[in-house]
Image (cartoon, rainbow, N blue to C red):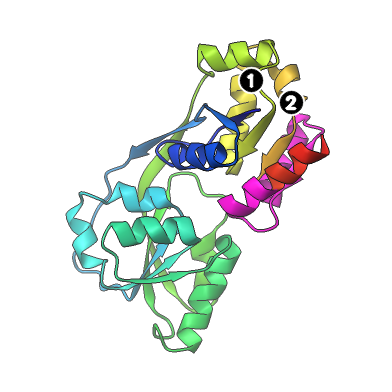
Amino acid sequence: MAILVTRPAPDNAKTAQALTARGLKALLAPTLRFEPMAFYDDHGAAYDGVILTSANAVRAIEDHEFKKRLVDLPSFAVGEHTAEAARLAGFKNIISAKGDAGALRDAVTKSATAKTIKKGATLCYLAGADLARDLAGELGERGFTVITHTAYRMIPVSSFPDDVTDAFRIGGVDAVLHFSRRSARAFLGAARAGGVEISALALPQFCISDAVAMVLRDGGAMQVAIARQPNEIDLLDALSRGLKAV
């Protein structure tokens, strides 16, 4: 069975390996492209911690002098994938929320209660250009000072590669994996641009969260399944269950 992976590079390679281990074929069609962005580094700012909502935030500062000021601070990662990217980049004190942005907000709050960071701490938020929620505002309401640096952006692709468009037309795709709201929206746009929207949306869509699933349902998908927890393992487990039910 062939599974379309809409996840951006380089993380899609990891997903492809996981699918191969489960006896499935991966078709890679990243619907977003990573691009780091220059940002102003206020050398006078004293941070007490770092917020990381994506592995892309880590990649964005991989070769940036700014990283040296952050790696020893408590770093709050949205999930294990982001936490692992931070570890590989040299961050030393990582707290994984093992969930979504709401879980990350709560993890920061609990750390202040546990005195891992001080109450009213100043946090450096390495953010993407398009935010799904106002995490900085939510933390601000809880007494934290959040300084947001827009460190990267994810650019939607205009169309699928020709081989992927052809696969949709000949029934060569059995299901689609979705990892974010923005990549799901880009998937819908690319399907329309390629003239394969009907065949693409007729397939089972497996989503990492309820928020991602909502994008697909609003776009017209009828077969939408959601991971029990917002991580790749649970998403692939949902895929396995769904394929057995077909």
Q: Which of 55 and 206 is in front in this view?
A: 206
Q: Residue 201 carries which label?
A: 2
| SS at badge 1 | helix
* Quarter containing the C terminus: top right
Q: Which residue is drawn at 52% across and 68% down?
A: 97
- Examine the image and state in which quarter residue 243 appears: top right
Q: Gap in Å between the C-alphas at discs 2 and 1?
A: 9 Å
Tell me, yes or no, whether the two marked residues, 2 and 1, touch with CB atoms within 8 Å: yes
Report whether residue 208 is seen.
no
Q: Residue at x 48, y 61 (%)?
A: 80
Question: Magenta segment, which residues?
Answer: 209-237
Q: Work out whether 103 lies above or below 120.
A: above
Question: In the image, is residue 87 part of the stretch drawn in magenta?
Answer: no
Q: Dot 1: few (<14), some (14–19), or many (≥20) neighbours within 10 Å?
A: many
Left or right side of 132 for 201: right
Left or right side of 183 for 84: left
Q: Work out whether 211 lies above or below 110.
A: above
Report whether residue 74 is seen.
yes
Question: In the image, is residue 223 part of the stretch drawn in magenta?
Answer: yes
